[in-house]
Image (spheres, coloured by chain):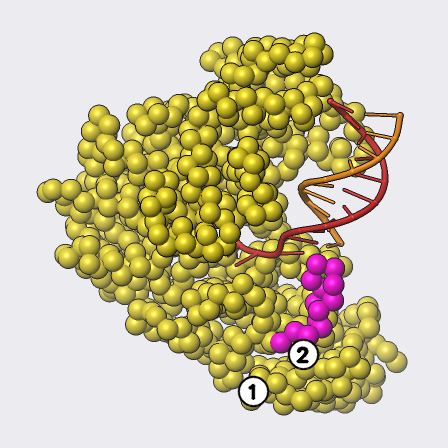
Chain colours: A yellow, B red, C orange
Amino acid sequence: MKYLDELNDIQRQAVTTTKGPVMVIAGPGSGKTRVLTYRIAHLINSGVAPWEILTLTFTNKAAKEMKERISKVVGERGGRVWAGTFHSVFARILRVEADKIGFPTSFTIYDTDDAKSLLKNIVREKNLDSKQYPPNVLYTRISSAKSNLITPKAYEAHKTLRDQDRMAKRPHIHAIYTTYMARCKKAGAMDFDDLLYQMFYLLHSNPDNVVEKYRQKFKYILVDEFQDTNQLQYGIIRKLVNYPKSEQNLCVVGDDAQSIYAFRGATIQNILDFEKDYKALQVFKLEQNYRSTEHIVQAANNIILNNRKQIQKKIWSDKGEGEKIKVLRTVTDKEEGKKVVGTIMEQKMRDHLSNNAIAILYRTNAQSRIFEEALRRQNVKYKVFGGLSFYQRKEVKDLIAYLRAVVNVNDEEAMRRVINYPVRGIGKSTIEKIGKAAAENDKTFWEILKTYQGTSRTTNAIRAFVFMIENFRKKLEAKDAYWLAAHIFEKSNMENSLKKDTTVQGISRMENVTNLLDGIKDFVENDELIDDATIPDKNLSTYLQTIALHTSADDDKDDTDKVTLMSVHSAKGLEFKSVFVVGLEENLFPSFMATKEGPEGMDEERRLFYVAVTRAERFLTLSYTGSRYKFGKLDNNIEPSRFLTEVGDQHIDYVGSMLGRSYDSSGNSVSERRTPRYAPVKKAVSIDVPAFTPVAPSLIREGLTVLHQRFGQGKVDKLSGAASNRIAIIQFDAVGEKRIMLKYAKLGIVE
DNA sequence: TAAGCATTAATTTTT
DNA sequence: TTAATGCTTA
């Protein structure tokens, strides 16, 4: 087996120990994905059918990549492994089994917006104060209840939860939870948590002994990123693995130090429980880091040492010392953008990095803007991940809502969205009345709609709408998803109403819908391997499921060369030659929420920082600023992040930055606060380099006054070296003497 | 009912 | 700063 030679000893053991429960603790860059894929390949090579293997990953993209890598080892059949996120795999199973637990198999998936809008309606119907019951709070509360396997009934009886709610003056949350669940069921809809919750419920209540079917089917189960699973997810796994005479072929891979989703209910308790739940457990620790150089790896170790709880582990690298970590400090946020991009330009030039090799990582998506602007100014191509995804745009959601309404007429949220778009004279108050009637008479929105009587004008409008939807439904069986979507777009009058808008935005909306239609076409035409056969399952509801679970992390990196901009969360599992972690400021990274939450919140922020730092292969740059715009207001009282002091000075290079000082409004240094023992302050002002056009190296002569991108103005003292490799010694006004290699540096001539 | 205008509230991370 | 909500008027 050739692939076994590509592994180190521990990795190989983790791959070849195929029977029984196995836990792999995998530090960052330790070849985790390789172990997982080779393990699966190894299973297949030893006679296990690909479709008997279930692999649960964190993103769909990770699953896809894994399948491709498996296929490289074992051939095409590798693609037939069951691999996907918890959500997508269980959605697929529920597509088949949902009717056993009272849902239609064509159930729709409510995204966060749908869920919140439904919650809002419920609060209104219950005549509760919408200020007291904001949808965000309700959603989080319900989500975390589900993630902890707390049913509405259990919630009602749960003393701690009820006390918390009472203290927050929200005593009716349990009732809202109950109604919410009922309404989702009536609408034939599941929210993200339900995909797991209902899956658990299916296995737990076990109608027609369905659990047996899946225990038989999935003989080997692998879970990636186990540290980010919640109790509910672990519960499902146990249902599938724990039964009499089970071989318990379960392999979980994770790293407690990289657990960054506690806010979503994930708990490293699962890792700890795992050892208790599976007595025969074999543990393998992967500690060698193949990704980063030593300064980075050791800085990471230093950082995580500040956390209280963790599994003993120390990652190491033999890739050499490498470059020190650079720290940039600026006065304003704009300048932070400029400096980061300046450093990027420098690395591109001096180290020949392509844009692809570079990532800017931030704590909050809102930070991207400043870097986007700076990159645009320098004409550097970039791609922003996260934020508003394609499928969240209004016009895209509108058309999708039509499709949802047609597939499942009980999908109340979709129905409400399209009933008066484009405007057809069914106004707010009418919709309100219908909603109320439905809630009061225990009917669905659609049932009321079909027989609704209002003024003759609205009644006619409603009749026409119902007629239209029913007509669409007639085509559902005979036509494929693409045909139907295009048909609906036209006949619903959406097309005309979009065409009327000839503004720039209007045109771009039209383009987005066209792109959506193209996407549907693509989906219809591409076959997918499912199980041991190719199933042409191309109906609309499968399509809707796929896009509902699509996230920006699943976006393919397009083949053009672009700098990556993303949140630290979405950078999980990725690596780049050069990484910039920006906005390292108190109350931003760590976030102000964590600061008030206490030590647990802070530990999670630190793990997040650990993840960010360990994304870098060769170059790591940290940046922060003294003042920043926050919701339109200038905050110039920013302190550097506590995390900066945890990196370890021996790994940091403070080139050109002034650390550990705060400045008052006139730019004077103010007495030191709490950032100790930082690099000496060289100059009290940052070097403001004016724009210049770089000249060819051959034009640089001794005695010239030149401009350097980072060091500012200086005088060329001496030239040495061959013409092709010329080195200039330059006396800079701001930073003193520097040796500059002309072929890499960009210099402008002043005189 | 629908569109236009004014006010106000809210901003962490994501399947 | 932006998004969303509320209010007024045709």
| Residue at figure coordinates x 82%, y 69% from the top left | A691
What secondary structure is marked by label 1?
A: loop
Chain letter, disc 1 residue: A
Coordinates of residue A335 in the picture (x, y in percent)? 73, 69
Q: Name which residue lies at 72% across and 87% down.
A: A669
Q: Which mark is residue A505?
A: none
The answer to whether mark 1 and mark 2 are in CB contact below 8 A is: no
Seen in the image, is A625 located left or right of residue A172? Answer: right
Query: Cα distance, mark 1 to mark 2?
Result: 35 Å
- Quadrant (top left, top right, bottom left, bottom right) of the C terminus of chain A: bottom right
Question: Mark 1 sits on what residue?
Answer: A676
Q: Position of residue A542 (x, y in %)?
A: 45, 27
Residue A414 on the magenta segment: no
Q: Residue furthest left?
A: A245
Question: Magenta stretch?
Answer: A627-639
Q: Is residue A28 above or below residue A540?
A: below
**Residue A159 left/right relative to A361:** left
Q: Are marks 1 and 2 on the same chain?
A: yes
Q: Position of residue A417 (x, y in %)?
A: 61, 28
Q: Quadrant of residue A663?
A: bottom right
Q: Earlier in the sequence, mark 1 or mark 2?
A: 1
Please tell me whether residue A685 is drawn above or below residue A607 in the rendered image: below
Q: Is residue A206 visible?
A: yes
Front residue of this view, candidates A177 and A104: A177
**Closest to the observer: A545 or A156?**
A156
For disc 2, the marked residue is A741
- Percent across and percent down for residue A406 are 53, 19
Identify the residue shown where x is 33% and y is 46%. Answer: A157
Q: Is residue A630 magenta?
A: yes
Q: Chain of mark 2?
A: A
